[in-house]
Image: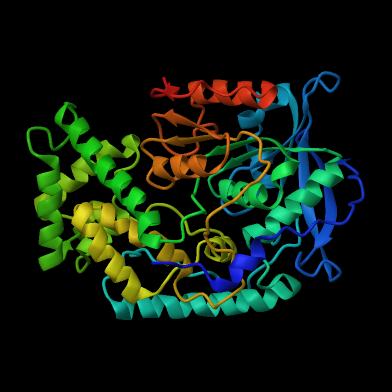
Amino acid sequence: MNIVASFVIGAVTAVAPATTTPISWQDCGDGLQCAQIQVSADWARESGPKVAIGLAKLPAQDQAGKKGVLLVNTGGPGEQISLLRQGKKYFTDLTKWFDVVIFDPRGFGKSAVINCPVPAPYATEWVFPNKPAYDAYAAKNRTFGKACAKEAGTLSGKLNSWQIAHDMEAIRKALGQTELTYLGNSHGTVLGQAYAELFPRKIGRMYLDSVWDHTTPDLYEWLRPRARALEANAERFAAWCESTATCALRGKDPLAVWDEVMATARREPIPAPEAGPDVRISDTQIASRVNFTYQATWERLAAGLARAQAGDASFFAKVEGLPDPDLSRVVLCADLPYPGYDKLKTLETALRRDTPRIGWRMVWPMANHCAGLPPTRTYPPHPIKTPGLPPVLIANGEHDDNSPAADGRRLAAQLPGARYLKAVGGHALYFSGHPCVREHVHRYLTTGTMPPRGTSCGPAK
């Protein structure tokens, strides 16, 4: 299924930003220095209105011996400066060598902020059970999207990685750097891919962690690695359970119990007395709320499945996690536009043939973000060409079903000279503290030395 709009073919050409006024940093508390620069609201029409981009810097510990500036995006999409303020410890190693600079993407935080007047809806059952449920949610999301677009003013339709990559180039110029050194995590890798495509010769070194592939227009091919990774995590859960004395399903086949619970809930929703006398939990609710990804949740999950097998699905009545920040879905869906219900059901059917237990669920998380959003100017996935790009280091966790290892390998195969670092782990390898990954990242960023081909990092200790 090709989701690339035809107009994008000509849209990948970079627009060179005008010369930017050097940055004037001011102390802003917590050891940070803050500033703003002005950039074009629409880089396709550079002479038009300007908007502010907020920056924050965590200075290098040794200013005399520092190796330069490292621009970082931790993902989201969303605010970055507040994360730096709250989580400075995650950047301590980097400040041995660099001034670490973070920026709030357009629309967020200390940049030209967009405060959407209507809250974004959030589906606690985002594996939509039927088309009426999907349509009702999509209508709410459309109302949110229209109100948000009106509030965005000059930024309406200009919240995608193509625009933000141009902002990054303006930041590079304002920082006085001849080349950009960049660390991007999760959605920050989408920004990195856009920058690499638009400004390949302006990159010094780039590390991309937990890559979201933005080069594959075929949605089935994009979803299939996610489905397989999630299915593999369910199998990891079962293996853990069979070898762990505290697993409530020890002595049983955990995946057979899962199949039984799902079949029962599909025939007739299972009572959840702890949530209320009339609450019953369906198979799509269970699929929306189960977590096979993180081992820290497995003991509780096993106990919940054991209870559900016995007729009490109260564990799956609980909804964990919070809605994404209102504006983040606008950016995400501009970079990864998503089809409607009928096409998604077709994709689910196709994925069920390969990943029948739970992997097929990966069709639906993006629908929770994108369903019904009004059309906007997008920068959807497309093959990438980066002439003159220096070697880029890429790493994904082998157990990550949000940004599967296949995404990192696929991108590395397209970037000349790129090196893929295999690592046993989950999402955000660097920021989660994976010691082997961090060692290779530090060596690469400070010296340009890549891990030898075939290098693999085992589980974090």
Location of residue 59 by image quarter? top right
Task: Name the one closer to the observer, 423 or 198.
Answer: 198
The reply, left or right, for residue 238 in relation to residue 133 is left
Q: Residue at x 62, y 51 (%)?
A: 191
Asked if residue 316 can be seen in this view, the reply is: yes
Task: Name the one closer to the observer, 2 or 323.
Answer: 2
Task: Name the one closer to the observer, 386 or 437.
Answer: 386
Asked if residue 268 can be seen in this view, the reply is: no
Q: Position of residue 429 (x, y in %)?
A: 49, 33
Q: Residue at x 58, y 24 (%)?
A: 450
Location of residue 447 by image quarter? top right
Count of picture labels: 0
Establish if 428 lies above or below 244. below
Q: Position of residue 338 (x, y in %)?
A: 45, 68
Q: Position of residue 264 (x, y in %)?
A: 10, 60
Q: Position of residue 123 (x, y in %)?
A: 39, 66
Quarter holding the C terminus is: top left
Q: Residue at x 55, y 75 (%)?
A: 144
Establish if 296 lies above or below 411. above
Establish if 112 lies above or below 147. above
